[in-house]
Amino acid sequence: METTYPVEDKVGSMLQKGGEHFHPGLSVDCVIFGFHDNQLKVLLLKMKHADKWALPGGFVYKEEDVEHAAVRVLESRTGLSDIFLRQYHTFGAPARSDRKLNRELLESVGMEPHEGHWFLQRFITVGYYALVDFSSAVPRPDEISEACAWWDLQEIPLLTMDHNHILQKALETLRKQLNDQPIGYNLLPEKFTMPELQRLYETILGKRLDRRNFQRKMLGYGILNRLEERKQGVAHKAPFLYSFNQERYGAALQDGLQQGW
Amino acid sequence: METTYPVEDKVGSMLQKGGEHFHPGLSVDCVIFGFHDNQLKVLLLKMKHADKWALPGGFVYKEEDVEHAAVRVLESRTGLSDIFLRQYHTFGAPARSDRKLNRELLESVGMEPHEGHWFLQRFITVGYYALVDFSSAVPRPDEISEACAWWDLQEIPLLTMDHNHILQKALETLRKQLNDQPIGYNLLPEKFTMPELQRLYETILGKRLDRRNFQRKMLGYGILNRLEERKQGVAHKAPFLYSFNQERYGAALQDGLQQGW
């Protein structure tokens, strides 16, 4: 992209001048997954003006690529660029826009918006999900939020608008992707054990997997290098360390893991 | 949906009053697949005001569900309701909007639009693909088109704007879907032979498949009923007829064909 856009939007000017700057009635929402302490986590924002949490999102500048807007949101909230990011669904139900909530937000910053205010219109949102390195991400709230934090997938609170639905659909997409494509490169440290990889799959799928079947299937994909070292600091039977074979991982991401037609 | 919308839009009033009626900067485009004469076909429209073909598409009314807009386009162009329809990608590159072409369209119906005219703004489009029964569909052009016709997938002409890209992405989605989900219920007649089913897969994949492997894999899915009759009018070795087992087909559509994790 040659054009640059402000990574951070100042809430006052954004809400005042949004109608001039943004594509009307369009937003992006990002489901940002990270993996830590054997748990799949999602990055959420605590809104300032309401007692609810929300997915990180933003608006699309008039001449900005929609995908670029998602990259911008990701960078703003995590400090990370060059993230695994995928568009998975556009949410277009008219009832999804909560105009009362949006009016309250405008009023909370001292505005008295007229009915036709750009922020009080119906919004369509394009959903993206991202897989990020938990330890590298530095969560940062946006201007309308007071906190930005990782939540365990099992403990997601009631979110604003249709954000629980948007999150659920991202998780379903990720689960389907597990059958077709490798996962883990962006979520695990460079070196990991087979039990750590298995735990990642289990937390995404929400169920336990058989250890031997998992190992057989994983090794069968040919995307792992077994390293000549074992996990440190483990009492006995220290497990081998693995890393992803970058070339084969990339090819599997491109062509799929399963033998297709 | 309780609200009803006109199935057909009159081009004059649509272009004049669109700014009042439609969600700004948003359209839907539909890649409608049918199967006939052993060929996968796509329904295209010949534009009146330009020497190009286009995918069927339309705008979204201000309080209309985006998916409903796609259903409306499908019904308008094929006469069919209750169609297999799936959203697959939203196209959000700023360069995709062809404002010169849109201005020419407005001028072709006698309008002299100002710069801020709603139809000359940037549009995001939500892509849907549909699988329809070729023999039941009655192709009908819309008000800005002079023809609506099926094209062989191998003979698709240069389309307007990014429509070749939108079509290609739908085809890629359909190919991926073949690995996960059954296909054919909406594309084949109620009774069909194994060679006809194989030909459907081959035309989607754009390659020949081994006859015995195909049959083994297909029967292994458990979604077919072999009927007690054979194809009529075939000289010798008339092939068996099959139909889809509706219950198992539905379950496979829901849960996937492959043994997942």
Image (spheres, coloured by chain):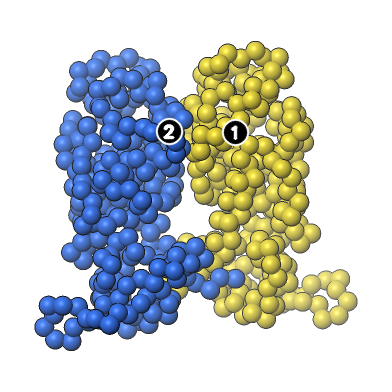
Chain colours: A yellow, B blue
Location of residue B55 with respect to A232 vertically, above or below? above
Q: CA distance from mark 1 to mark 2?
A: 30 Å
Q: Position of residue B212 (x, y in %)?
A: 32, 84
- Is residue A255 among what the camera can see? no
Circle 1 sits in a helix, a strand or a loop, which is it? strand
Location of residue B231 with respect to B105 vertically, above or below? below
**Residue in view at x 28 percent, y 22 percent:** B13
Q: Which residue is mark 2?
A: B3
In the rendered image, the quadrant that contains the C terminus of chain B is: bottom right
Give the numbered dot on residue B247: none
Q: Seen in the image, is B201 located left or right of residue A55?
A: left
Q: Seen in the image, is B208 located left or right of residue B4?
A: left
Q: Is disc 2 on the same chain as disc 1?
A: no
Q: Seen in the image, is A138 located left or right of residue B14?
A: right
Circle 2 sits in a helix, a strand or a loop, which is it? loop
Q: Chain of mark 2?
A: B
Residue extending farthest front: B2
**Residue in view at x 27 percent, y 57 percent:** B133
Location of residue A106 with respect to A188 vertically, above or below? above
Q: Which residue is mark 1?
A: A58
Q: Position of residue A143 (x, y in %)?
A: 70, 28
Circle 1 or circle 2, nearest the eye: 2
Q: Badge 2 local density, few (<14 within 10 Å), some, or many (20+)?
A: few
